[in-house]
Amino acid sequence: MEGIYKQSMFQLLSIEFGRRMKEIREGKGLKQKHISIITGISESYLSRIEQGKVNIKLETMARIISYLECSPTLFFTTTDFDKNIS
């Protein structure tokens, strides 16, 4: 049971991170290509992150957050996310 809980928690975190990444990226008028060039993360992988289709590594999150120049808390402090983990 604990393994299933951890897996679903990571999935929720990845989905929320991707959703917020897309909102922030679009809000700054950036294309996935811009992030890809600077971070070295492929556009296809960035797309899969935004769609919540991958369990993103912490290092990858840090590179994206650094590029977007925003607080990590912006990615994990939404009402929807709080509802999903309750």
Image (cartoon, rainbow, N blue to C red):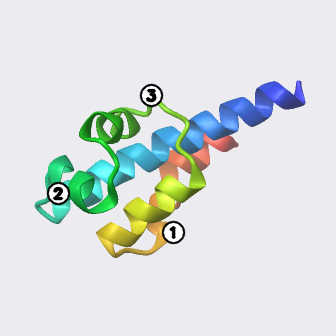
In the image, residue 74 above or below residue 42: below
Name the side, left or right, on which 40 lies relative to 79: left
Which quadrant would residue 43 be assigned to in this image?
Answer: top left
Q: Is residue 78 visible?
A: no
| Label ID, residue 73 | 1
Residue sticking out furthest to the right: 1
Callout 3: helix, strand or loop? Answer: loop
Check disc 3 and report the residue beneath it.
Answer: 53
Circle 3/circle 1 CB separation < 8 Å: no
Query: Which numbered marker is on residue 34?
Result: 2
Q: Badge 1: few (under 14), some or many (20 or more) residues near its Cα, within 10 Å?
A: few
Please tell me which residue is depicted at 40% across the width and 44% down the height of the picture: 18
- Label 1 vs label 2, nearer the camera: 2
User: What's the residue type where badge 3 is placed?
Assistant: Lys
Residue 68, position as x, y percentages in the image: 31, 68
Quarter of image, res 53: top left
Residue drawn at x 14%, y 58% as measured from the top left: 30
Q: Is residue 81 above or below residue 24?
A: above
